Image (cartoon, rainbow, N blue to C red):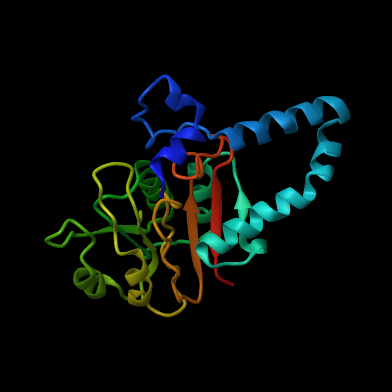
Amino acid sequence: MDPDRLRAQTPGFVHRIHLNNAGAALMSRSTLAAMTAHLRLEAEIGGYEAAAQARDQIDVTYAALAQLVGGRSDEVALFDNSTHAWNAAFYSIPLGPGDRILTGRDEYGSNVLAYLQVARRSGAEIVVVPDDGDGQIDLGALTRLVDERTKLIGLTWVPTSGGLVNPAAAVGPHRPRRRRPVPSGRHPGRRPVPRRRQRRGLRSADGHRAEVSPRTARNRLPVGP
């Protein structure tokens, strides 16, 4: 990674030091050019017509996202923001009385709110897995807590702040058969995304931080059959 090259590609670096990349990174020249060019095209020929004309570029985007996470392009869905994306995946999981949701101590706030709402409505139980000595989710404790009542293991791979990187790839094998694995996310692009050898899985991730895409182009990346 060449910092000078990245700065040259980012107009905002000319006049400021931007420290809020965890909220939204500055857009690159190529991102800005793509957005403005498409807006002009919509103004000239119409929104649906512009979308049809950009079909090949859209397909390339889905293929690139699939390659990033080791999935297929037909397993990728784009949403307006990562919270909506994650909620769409999470609320699709049927939960009932006695079912268990296992999660870590550094789970993303909006994910926890969804857990609480569904637990209150369905009678499911939320179980918080303790951290290990390094502050990551304790895989040994996770192994002991997983049982046939576990329907979901929810984990944020790289939380918004603090520098923590959870061992997301190591969590999948700890789940029992026929149970949902980790809906994880946040900050792909700056780190290699774990390619989990799992039967099924759901991931949500945003594109407006590390990928410096527009804030309305965040995504959900469901992985697995």
In the picture provided, is 55 more to the left or to the right than 139? right
Residue 51 vertical placement versus 142 (above, below): above
- Residue 106, image x and y in percent? 27, 50
Relative image position of residue 159 (x, y in whole percent): 32, 48
**Left or right: 198 as drawn, with respect to 72:** left
**Camera-side residue of 44 and 17:** 17
Could you say which is closer to the camera, residue 61 or residue 157? 61
Residue at 37%, 68% (x, y): give it.
169
Residue nearest the viewer, comparing 120 with 37:
37
Q: Name the residue: 54% across, 57% down.
A: 221
Residue found at the very far bottom of the displayed protein: 177
Q: Is residue 139 above or below residue 129?
A: below
Furthest residue to the top?
15
| Location of residue 8 with respect to 59 vertically, above or below | above
Compared across the picture, whether 37 is left or right of 217 comes to: right
Residue 40 seen by the camera:
yes
Quarter-of-image position of residue 157: bottom left
Q: Position of residue 54 (x, y in %)?
A: 78, 44
Measuring from the top left, give residue 114's x and y in whole percent: 42, 46
Q: How many marks?
A: 0
Identify the residue shown where x is 51% and y is 60%.
93
Residue visible at 58% across and 35% down?
Answer: 216
Do we see residue 94 in this rendering?
A: no
Q: Given the current orientation, which residue lies at the most extreme left position? A: 133
Above-or-below relation of 224 to 209:
below
Identify the image quadrant of residue 72: bottom right
Quadrant housing the C terminus? bottom right
